[in-house]
Image: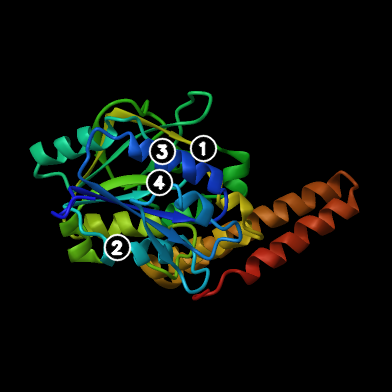
């Protein structure tokens, strides 16, 4: 690593799937932008990444004292990062060799833009949905509810998913996934890191919302396309669905108060009762009981703090 301040600091939380971490680090080694530092945060991963990191001596390895989740792992890396630009990067991504150079040049020449998010493609070349509008209170009553189940093309859902945009043109963004988000150091200095109460989900939504409230602007950057294996680490967590509901509840409660909490709880139970009664109507008592039991389990996750 150069002794001078790096241009880009890359923060990579890791929890399992260390073979994908190795591919990610190889893609960073090939970057045409040479003034970078890479910080890998081991979030108490059951799959020890040590043998992978040993092959990348230039990487700074940071260790969490306990498994704190995605938000806490990113926050562990932020105060250690020295770069002019900071990059949240998931360990299940691979970047083309010119990615950091081109993204940095864009921010250099667009001082009004605080951060950028590139195109994400899956292993088959398909375009991934990684950008959304900010959740509204009305969406909270609809998302993952019986309405969502019965009417997936509901206008509120289409608007949230930006369904009328092809995902290939440059534009201003509200919420972009932090799977690959390059932003100016000033953002971190102004708004801080992620909300660790949002352990695995909605922490990126919250980060982008606070960024926007502080007057910063995000843009979509289609000139760079990355490979994103998608959900590799999350898939190794147990009870991930309960974590989704719990983090959604805490996000809505944080920004919409009791009305937000009511919205998430109402949406959950509307879907649970719809699915339970549907199974009963089909005469399947066993599956009806499973649907109801799942609803009870998910309802227990709807608490203010983890």
| Alpha carbon separation for disc pair 1 and 4 | 10 Å
Kindly indicate the quadrant of the structure image that contains residue 213. bottom left
Q: Tell whether 284 sits left or right of 55.
A: right
Name the front one of labels 2 and 4: 2
Residue 107, x across and y down, in percent: 15, 41
Q: Element type at marker 1?
A: loop
Residue at left offset 18%, top offset 56%: 185
Residue at left offset 57%, top offset 69%: 302
| Alpha carbon separation for disc pair 3 and 1 | 15 Å
Residue at left offset 78%, top offset 52%: 277
Q: Tell whether 271 sits left or right of 16.
A: right
Label 1 vs 2, first from the N-terminus: 2
| Mark 1 in CB contact with mark 2 (< 8 angstroms) | no
Nearest the camera: 94 or 237? Answer: 94
Q: Tell whether 217 sits left or right of 224.
A: left
Other-residue count near label 1 (Cα within 10 Å), few / some / many at <14 / 14–19 / ≥20 = some
| Alpha carbon separation for disc pair 3 and 4 | 17 Å
| Alpha carbon separation for disc pair 2 and 4 | 15 Å
Q: Is residue 76 above or below residue 134?
A: below
The numbered disc on residue 26 is: 3
Nearest the camera: 237 or 97? Answer: 97
Mark 4 lies on residue? 179
Q: Is residue 92 visible?
A: no
Q: Element type at marker 4?
A: loop
Q: Tell whether 152 sits left or right of 209.
A: right
Residue 303, x across and y down, in percent: 55, 74
Kindly indicate the quadrant of the structure image that contains residue 203. bottom left
Label 3 vs 4, first from the N-terminus: 3
């Amino acid at each position: 690593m150069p002794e001078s301040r790096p241009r880009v600091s890359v923060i990579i939380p890791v929890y399992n799937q260390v073979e994908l971490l190795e591919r990610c680090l190889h893609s960073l080694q090939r970057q045409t932008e040479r003034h970078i530092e890479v910080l890998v945060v081991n979030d108490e991963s059951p799959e020890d990444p040590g043998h992978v990191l040993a092959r990348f001596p230039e990487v700074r390895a940071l260790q969490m004292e306990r498994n704190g989740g995605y938000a806490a792992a990113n926050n562990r890396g932020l105060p250690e990062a020295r770069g002019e630009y900071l990059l949240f990067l998931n360990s299940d991504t691979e970047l083309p060799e010119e990615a950091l150079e081109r993204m940095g040049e864009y921010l250099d020449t667009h001082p009004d833009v605080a951060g950028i998010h590139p195109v994400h493609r899956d292993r088959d070349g398909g375009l991934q949905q990684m950008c959304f509008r900010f959740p509204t209170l009305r969406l909270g009553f609809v998302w993952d509810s019986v309405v969502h189940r019965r009417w997936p093309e509901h206008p509120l859902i289409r608007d949230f998913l930006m369904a009328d945009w092809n995902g290939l043109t440059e534009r201003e963004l509200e919420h972009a996934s932090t799977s690959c988000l390059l932003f100016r150091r000033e953002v971190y200095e102004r708004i801080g890191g992620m909300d660790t109460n949002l352990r695995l989900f909605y922490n990126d939504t919250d980060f982008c919302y606070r960024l926007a409230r502080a007057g910063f602007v995000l843009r979509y950057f289609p000139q760079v396309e990355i490979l994103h294996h998608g959900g590799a680490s999350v898939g190794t967590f147990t009870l991930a669905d309960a974590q989704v509901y719990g983090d959604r509840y805490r996000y809505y409660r944080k920004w919409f108060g009791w009305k937000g909490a009511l919205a998430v709880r109402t949406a959950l139970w509307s879907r649970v009762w719809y699915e339970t009664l549907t199974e009963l109507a089909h005469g399947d008592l066993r599956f009806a009981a499973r649907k109801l039991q799942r609803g009870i389990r998910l309802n227990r996750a709807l608490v203010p703090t983890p």
